[in-house]
Image (spheres, rainbow, N blue to C red):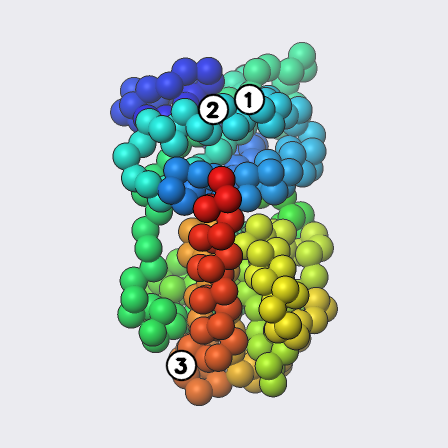
């Protein structure tokens, strides 16, 4: 069951007009929220980031946090899996094609769906994943979670074409993030995290990782990470709401460090599971 503009229905019945500005211009924003045991994880943080994205495209929030919680709760209840991931999508609505905002404004299109959250297969945790690098050729507002994802789509496909799972992006020889993930490097036990600025999405999982590092005495630095530090890292970590934390063990066809998930990944993965279960038990 999905939510579309005030109504709940099976996804097969959902329809939007072709003049929707999401379809015509990619004029909208989205969120992806993991759901564990039917509870949205870090809901307040995701709703805060959604507000940041909406502010970034000058679109008023269609719902209060209470209304969002109610809609999301109903969509979660209308889907079978215990663990899911919610997808929220808001566009500037339906209007005659014109780049300028509709004046007077039209109602936004609001769509929410949920899908089962797949568990990362054990072999990925044991071996890690392979990635390629590419120049980050996206715009300069990557902090907005915009639905116009064509650069991310092309960059991710580069990885797939080369038999890999993710593309690690560099802008002017500094690490930004992955095509659909945040990236951390590890050197001599130190976790290195690029700063949350306009060049990357402020990941909710990224914040959890730094909180866990802080609470467990894992040394970390938030600072610009050079391409050379990425290529010479002992470990590389990838995070996202749907993947949690994974080790990148091959980059551009070469092993990262020893070529296997390292001690910082293993510790972080275990602490992440513990953290998640503790938070969900408290609900
Ligand atoms: N993407 N950077 C980009 C470009 C992303 O698309 C994502 C997540 C992240 C990680 O953010 P978070 O930890 O809040 O999920 C970083 C989602 C999962 C997607 O587009 O499906």
* Residue 58 picture quarter: top right
Q: CA distance from mark 3 to mark 1?
A: 45 Å
Residue 137 visible in the snapshot: no
* Residue 38 picture quarter: top left
Circle on res. 260: 3
Can you say whether 225 is above or below 275 in the image?
below
Marks 2 and 3, the one that precedes in the sequence: 2
Dot 3 falls on a residue whose secondary structure is loop
Identify which residue, 275 or 21, lies in the foreground.
275
Circle on res. 108: none
Quarter in which the N terminus is drawn: top left
Q: Are marks 1 and 2 in contact (CB under 8 Å)?
A: yes
Can you say whether 163 is above or below 15 in the image?
below
Marks 3 and 1, the one that precedes in the sequence: 1
Other-residue count near label 1 (Cα within 10 Å), few / some / many at <14 / 14–19 / ≥20: few
- Residue for point 60% across, 27% down: 65
Residue 130 pos. (x, y %): 39, 72
Circle on res. 67: 1
Q: Is mark 2 within 8 Å of ligand 1?
A: no
Q: Which residue is mark 2?
A: 71
């Amino acid at each position: 069951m999905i939510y579309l503009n005030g109504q709940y229905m099976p996804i097969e019945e959902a329809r939007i007009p072709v003049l929707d500005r999401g379809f015509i211009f990619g004029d909208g924003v989205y969120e992806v929220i993991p759901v564990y045991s039917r509870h949205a994880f870090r809901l307040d943080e995701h709703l805060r980031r959604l507000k940041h994205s909406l502010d970034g495209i000058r679109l008023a929030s269609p719902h209060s946090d209470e209304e969002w919680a109610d809609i999301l709760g109903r969509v979660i209840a209308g889907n079978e899996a215990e663990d899911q991931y919610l997808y929220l999508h808001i566009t500037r609505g339906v209007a005659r094609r014109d780049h300028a905002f509709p004046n007077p404004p039209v109602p936004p299109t609001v769509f929410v769906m949920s899908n089962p959250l797949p568990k990362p297969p054990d072999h990925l945790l044991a071996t890690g994943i392979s990635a390629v690098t590419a120049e980050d050729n996206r715009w300069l507002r990557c902090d907005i979670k915009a639905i116009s994802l064509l650069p991310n789509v092309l960059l991710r496909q580069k990885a797939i074409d080369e038999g890999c799972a993710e593309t690690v992006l560099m802008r002017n020889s500094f690490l930004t993030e992955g095509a659909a993930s945040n990236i951390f490097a590890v050197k001599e036990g130190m976790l290195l995290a690029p700063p949350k600025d306009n060049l990357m999405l402020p990941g909710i999982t990224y914040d959890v990782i730094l909180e866990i590092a802080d609470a467990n005495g894992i040394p970390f630095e938030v600072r610009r990470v050079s391409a050379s530090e990425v290529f010479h890292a002992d470990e590389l970590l990838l995070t996202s709401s749907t993947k949690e934390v994974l080790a990148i063990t091959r980059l551009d066809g070469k092993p990262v460090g020893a070529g296997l998930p390292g001690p910082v990944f293993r510790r972080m993965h275990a602490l992440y599971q513990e953290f998640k279960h503790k938070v969900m038990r408290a609900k």
